[in-house]
Image (cartoon, grey):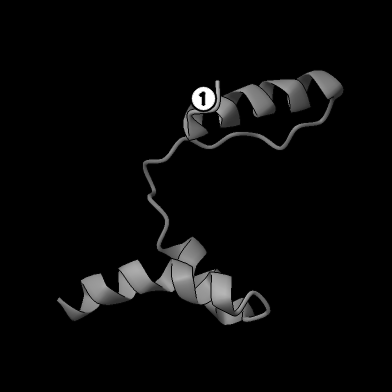
Amino acid sequence: MVLFYHLVKLPSLVLAHREDDDAIEELIKRGNPNSPVYPFPQTEEDFQQMAEILKRKLGNS
């Protein structure tokens, strides 16, 4: 139960203390290893594709 509490509270902690690099690093480490990996956009077309992906993921289509 304690671990679940910390997993839920970590994103809130990072948002409240954006300068805390250790908290941000820990949040990244706890990410889902099965999540898809998207390459960093290199061209204007790449940026447009990334924007569309984000819109779909966030439900703002």
Tell which of 50 and 56 is nearer to you.
Answer: 56
Classify the position of the N terminus by image quarter. bottom left
Looking at the image, residue 2 sits to the left or right of residue 57; the answer is left
Tag 1, which secondary structure? Answer: helix
Q: Position of residue 4 (x, y in %)?
A: 23, 70
In the displayed structure, would residue 9 be above or below residue 49?
Answer: below
Identify the residue position indicated by label 1 in the image: 56
Residue appearing at x 56%, y 70% in the figure:
15
Q: Position of residue 43 (x, y in %)?
A: 84, 25
Residue placed at 67% from the left, 28% from the top?
51
Q: Amino acid at mark 1?
A: Arg
Return the residue nearer the eye: 61 or 42. 61
The quarter of the picture where residue 39 lies is: top right
Residue at horizontal 54%, vertical 27%? 60
Whether residue 38 sits left or right of residue 9 in the image: it is right
Residue 33 in the image, given as x and y percentages of width and height: 39, 48
Left or right placement of residue 16 versus residue 1 in this view: right
In this view, the residue farthest toward the left is 1
In the displayed structure, does residue 44 sit left or right of residue 1?
right
Q: What is the crowding at mark 1: few (fewer than 14 residues within 10 Å), some, or many (at least 20)? A: few
On-image quarter of the C terminus: top right
- Report the number of discs: 1
Nearer to the camera, 16 or 39: 16
Q: Nearer the viewer, residue 5 or 42?
A: 5
Point out residue 18 in the picture as x, y percentages from the top left corner. 64, 74
* Vertical comparison of 20 with 48: above or below: below
Q: Residue at x 42, y 72 (%)?
A: 10
22 relative to 4, above or below: below
Which image quadrant is residue 6 in? bottom left
